Image: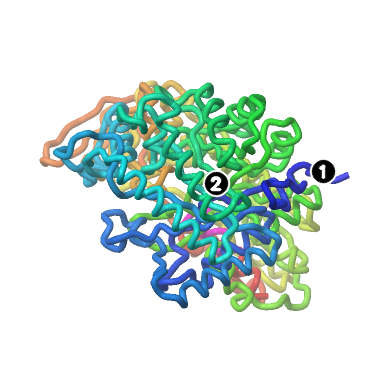
Amino acid sequence: MKKYKNVLSPLKVGGKVFKSRMISSNALPHFLQGPESYPGDQVINHMVECAKNGAAVVTFADWTKKDQRKSFNEDGRRFPMYDLDDPSVENYMCQLVDQVHYYGSFISLALMPFSGPDPLYDVNDEEPIDMSKLNSKKSKDELVDFNAAIMTRNGAGAKQMPPSMIRQIIEEQAQRAKLYKKFGFDMVTLHFAYRATLFGRFLSPITNRRTDEYGGSLENRARFMIELCTRIKQLCGKDFLIEVQYTPEETGGITIEDSIKLAKLAEDCVDIFQLRAQTGNKNHPTGYNSVMHHYDTLEASAKLKASGTSILMEPLGGFQNLDDMEEAISSGKADLIGGGRLFFVDPEYYKKAKEGRGEDVLPCVRCNKCHVPSMEGEWLSICTVNPEMGLRHKIDKMISPSSSQRKVAVIGGGPSGMRSAIYASDRGHQVTIFEKEERLGGQINLMDDMKFKWPIVNYREYLIRQVEKRNIKVILNKKVSPDEIKNQGFDTVIAALGALPKKPPIEGADKAYDSFSVLGHESELGKRCVVIGGSETGTEIAMYLAEAGHIVTVLTRQNDLALDATPIHYREMMQEYYYGLDSFDFITGASATGIRDGVVEYRDLEGNIKSIECDDVVALGGMYSLQDEAISFYDAADDFYMVGDCRNVGNIHKANRDAFSVTHQF
């Protein structure tokens, strides 16, 4: 009996048979593509890997638009651009389709126009949104209003479009679908979710204030969708499938009752509803706005399924756990499961699913770095836990075949040490981990009491399970010396000693708490706390203290908190989280100058010296790498490597990339 029988079962959709119940949604890592005017090898390979990894449908988006390279948005400027006026580009599109089809998967075109006139406004004299204010300090309500304005107005005022223009847009989009059908595409995915595009703004009563046949009642607001889908079917045929990305419930807008009615209206022209949460943030869940085994769209999917509609339901948002997905389908709550990160994280996801090894699936840590890791560079598409992301199209040329079996010592049992041990063991080597503490986990062990860090803690548990499943010897409570390693005759040493916190150069900081000493010890701190340092780490420590009942003020020299955090979705969710904490506050442009007698002094932007009374202080000055200690193991074996923070202070992604790179060199 197959453990994931329902997830892996085929499903007839129109005239097509899906090989599984999993769909790879529109989620191309944005920085894979170079300046090519066609889908490059790295993009084609990414799509093909999703097909190979179990996706019954792989979704491809062509977001090309005029002046894209001049966008204010550093992310949007780097989206792929395809020149469909060049016939040779069509050749590459057909190659993409052919390779996806090779693995028995179908391919869908994502249509999601962001630009153009907006159905919402009946005026043309609105001031453009000032995008420079993205990083300014706002109240919680101002933040919500600002993000909503960007989402619904796309950064500028617009005049309500006449019906003739609506019909023109419908025809243009349908003809685009027909063009991609000529390339071999099997279906189209239309973005009607969370009012993010022109399509979705028609559907939502929050944004559609029209009073003609395209506004008002649900039937009228749905008219655009029905006419567009009907026209696509007319041009492409009834077996050309249509999937609609859709928000089934939104605060102050569409209700589940509306969605049930919409499903009935759309049955003749829509094959699949891909159900998305009511905001982009909720639809890309992180530890800040999600809990394990809960999925925002699953309840709505169950209600729509129970209504008897013939449209297939595909909830999306945070799915990766195979047991949860199996239960969702076997219980009748869903027909399909959609996901983006679902297919990025573990290159062997489909293999493990077929073998019934859900506990061995590499868990996503919900960092959203695959979406956009930075808005200031480096411009790389990465996955924190999958070090092959961005390299898959050339990884075979970069790694060496495994050598004869070696005796390997890994010094340190944190993420980089455990991952190094796992890789080395899988390549046939005899591995021993030496860890000075009483358990494996390294710095992740400090996060146990930070409830929003549950995805990272879950990842630690996965690593420990994988170490235990292999023939890896683990020696705990042992601070081993270079001589001891040398005397045991190891062939290879991998130093994974990590890093330690350092205090900022501020008078009195030596007596303050640091990032290691405060976590797990918040009960020792007084009521009023000041955190000096507004990085992602400092912000999360302050959130942790505020949640535990302390009154917390963060001092940061920057113009906002956590500017080093993942900029798209992740940082926004962090903001929503701390704005929801009553005892959390922060002061920007503040440079701490001294800590003394229950007072923290700081200099503001105008150069004025000010002070805050407090009971305890957490002073963050970054981390320092244990490089010298690591280097001391150089002569302990003939082969020596350093990985993780002891090589250079970084993060889990860099630790995993080090572990993969090093262990595939011997």
Mark whose residue sits in front, 1 or 2: 1
Q: Residue at horizontal 57%, vertical 39%?
A: 273
Disc 2 target residue: 443
Magenta-highlighted residues: 650-659
Residue 445 visible in the snapshot: no
Real-space Cα separation, disc 1 to disc 2, in angstroms: 35 Å
Label 1 or label 2, whichever comes before in sequence order: 1
- The quadrant in which residue 372 appears is bottom left
Please give left or right for residue 151 compared with residue 55 in the image. Answer: left
Please give left or right for residue 10 compared with residue 2 in the image. Answer: left
Nearest the camera: 465 or 140? 140
Nearest the camera: 573 or 562? 573
Q: Residue at horizontal 29%, vertical 31%?
A: 145
Magenta stretch: includes residue 93: no
- The quadrant in which residue 139 appears is top left
Q: Is residue 349 above or below residue 139?
A: below
Position of the N terminus by quadrant: top right
**x and y percentages locating residue 471 in the rendered image:** 80, 58
Which SS does the magenta portion mostly show? helix
Query: What's under tag 1, amino acid-wise?
Result: Lys
Query: What's under tag 2, amino acid-wise?
Result: Gln
Helix, strand or loop under label 1: loop
Rate crowding at label 2 as few (under 14), some (14 to 19) or many (20 or more) other CA atoms within 10 Å: some
Please give left or right for residue 125 compared with residue 28 in the image. Answer: left
Disc 1 target residue: 3
**x and y percentages locating residue 487 in the rendered image:** 73, 69
Nearest the camera: 441 or 97? 97
Rate crowding at label 1 as few (under 14), some (14 to 19) or many (20 or more) other CA atoms within 10 Å: some
**x and y percentages locating residue 321 in the rendered image:** 67, 42
Residue 427 visible in the snapshot: yes
Helix, strand or loop under label 2: helix
